Structures are given as structure tokens and as C-alpha cells.
Image (tube, helix red, strand yellow):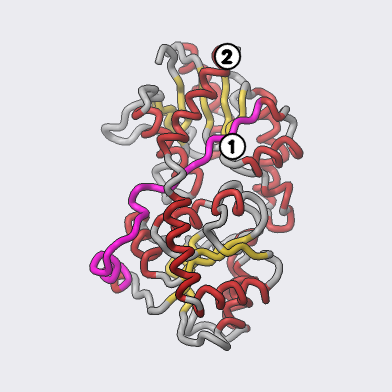
Amino acid sequence: MNFQVGLLSYALDRPIGGIGTYTRALIHGLAGAGCPPLLLRAGRLAPGEAGVGLPGSGRVPGLLTLGQLQIARHARQLGLDLVHDPTGTFPLALARCKKVVTVCDAFPYVTPKTSTALEKLVFRTWLPLALHKADAVITISNCSKNDIARYLPVPKEKIFVTPISNSPAYRPLPAEAVQPVLDKLHIPTPYILFVGSLEPRKNLLHLLQAYAQLRHHHPHYHLVIVGARNFWKNAPVVETVDALDLKDWVHFTGFVPEEDLPALYNGAHLFVFPSLYEGFGLPPLEAMACGTPVVTSNSSSLPEVVGDAAVTVDPYDVAAIAAAMASVLADPALAADLRQRGLTRAGQFSWERMAQETIKVYQHVLKA
């Protein structure tokens, strides 16, 4: 490629979520496609890490202030043609090169009751500033594109969709590769699985209520909930478990290393993800890639991701969630069909394709 991209890297030195997964895949994907980015690391570079560090900018306040000066200086001194912020948070107002921002979703606008004050501040203050200065906005689903165009000051023609993917590690595994992980994490069997952050829009309260109904017909299934526990968000979840007398049947693993997740998906009889809103919804795709039947929401981007390879339900309808879970667990033919459809569907997504589509966005912006 005859242009140089600076890619902002934030919080990759901590347990990562969806945006961190996207950033890491983008770094490797761009390099593999012949467009290696210059890493603009928020904070100091790790030993042996290539790129440019932004000392003092490892946390949000520093990156919003000192970091903007540092990014602008490096862009000028290193002759960067374009700077890409994959976090969709930090205004690149001072950089005089082309600017691309990734915004994965617009959930504080769509589901404001499930958003924290900080999330609302980011989306209503910082993000509009970032998009005002951006030459292009990348998002990860058509649903998100429509929401961004609806709620934020950016014309639809400046928004580009580059669907994300799951790691190749998410695949069907033999039992001898699964059981040691279940033993290590003390996972009871048989179990239904949820993977995601424990925040209100993930709809865990309705999931727990549906699971309580399911136990009347399938009392031997445990519910395993994988996700870091944020004390300011999950108190109602714990209270609901106690109120429904599910303490012996609902198991919170906390954060699980990424290398153990494929085994957890493989060991589950069913994956359930009744989220109220997702910009993409990576966990259902990971589950399908492992051959695990999926029940998920019929709203936001989730139908776009799963296609006809999952059972979709109204996430606000507890009885419908319970019935969908019961239908899969009670019907081996349906479960087998969902496994096959899921594997086929998951194969349609790839990080390589995402990287190639991202490069096309860069090229478009630099030609404009």
C-alpha cells in the first residue's frame, strides 16, 4: 500500500471485550493484507512492542487531552496519511490527516434505560465531536449503520459496514479437549450457556426468569453465565437469582480466558443470548462456529448475524424465551439442524474480509 495508517490502540493491556477483540483482529488483518498500521499505543509501549507510545494517555482523561496533542504530533512528524480510532470515543480534532472512526453501535440512544451516565456522556458529548471531525465512519452491521445515521450527526453516505468475525479457535472440538476445561472451571453438566458482560442491555433478568420457567420441564439443566462481574451493574442479577431460588443452578464464572471459551461453547447443550441491543453480537456467532444451537433476540443486529441458523425470540417476552429454549432441548432433530446451519452461517464471516473492506474505506477516504 502506498499510504501509512496510524491505528489508535487503547486498553489492550487489560481483559478485552468486543472492541478490544475488533482492534486486535484489525491490527493483524491489516498487516496480513499488506497494510500494516503504525500502532499508536495509549500509554507506554510494552517491551518489544512496535509502534509509538502515548505516555500519560493510558486512561480516558489523559487520552482525551494530552493524547490528542500526541496523536497530532506523531501524525505530522511521521507523515501519517490517515488515523483510525477503532474505539469510537476519542475526538481526533487536532490531527490534520484524514480521520476514520469505528462506532460499533448506538445503544445509549436506542436503549437509554440500560445505559450508565458515563455511556450517555460518551455518546452524547465525545462521540458527536469525533464524528464531526471524521472523514468516514466504520460500523459492523447494517443495523448499526441505520442507528448511527438516525441518532448522530453523520450522513449515511459516510458510514461503511465491515462485518466482524470470530477467531478460528471457535470450532467444534472433541470431548477430550472440552472436559478438562469444564473440570478446571468447575462447570456442572448438562448446562445452558450465556457469554457476555453483565450489564442491563444483555437482558439477564429476563433470561433468569425464563430459565426458572424452563426448570419446570427440564430441571436437570444448569445455567452458566460467563462474563466479568461489574458490581455497579449486576446487583439486580444476583438479587434475581436469590429471589427465584436458583443459587444452586446458576453459576457465574467471572472472566474466563479467551483460550477456554471454545471449550465452554462446545460443552453447552444450548447457547442463549436474549440481548436487548447489539451492534453485531459476536457471542452467538462464536457459539454457531462451535456447533452449538443458539437462541437469541429477534431485534437489533442479531437477526442480521444469525440469519436462519438460530431460533429468534422477542427479548421482552419471558415465556417466549423459555419456550424457545425448551423447544431446542426437547427436539434432537431441531438441535442437530441448528448445529449444521450455524456452522454454515459462521463460515460466511471472516476477519480477512473485514480487513479488506476496511482498506477499501481507507482508499475511498484518501481519494476524496
In this rendering, would 356 be left or right of 207? left
Tell me the element at label 2: loop
Residue 124, compared with residue 284, is above or below; it is: above
3D distance between C-alphas at marks 2 and 1: 23 Å
Nearer mark to the viewer, of 2 and 1: 1
- Find residue 138 and report its image quarter: top right
- Find residue 148 and report its image quarter: top right
**Residue under circle 2?**
96
For the point 42% across and 39% down, the residue is 351
In front of the other: 185 or 13:
185
**Residue under circle 1?**
139
Residues rendered magenta in the picture: 158-182
For the point 74% across and 31% down, the residue is 153
Residue 121, compared with residue 250, is above or below; it is: above
Quick one: label 2 or label 1, which is nearer the N terminus? 2
For the point 29% across and 67% down, the residue is 178
Q: What is the crowding at mark 1: few (fewer than 14 residues within 10 Å), some, or many (at least 20)?
A: many
Residues at circles 2 and 1 in contact by the CB criterion of under 8 Å: no
Looking at the image, the residue that sits furthest to the left is 176
Tell me the element at label 1: strand
Q: Amino acid at mark 2?
A: Arg
> Residue 277 at what x, y percent from top left?
65, 54
Residue 239 in sight:
no
For the point 55% across and 39% down, the residue is 60
In this rendering, would 42 be left or right of 241? left
Residue 347 in sight:
yes
> Residue 362 at what x, y percent from top left?
52, 21
Q: Amino acid at mark 1?
A: Thr
Is 213 contained in the magenta span?
A: no
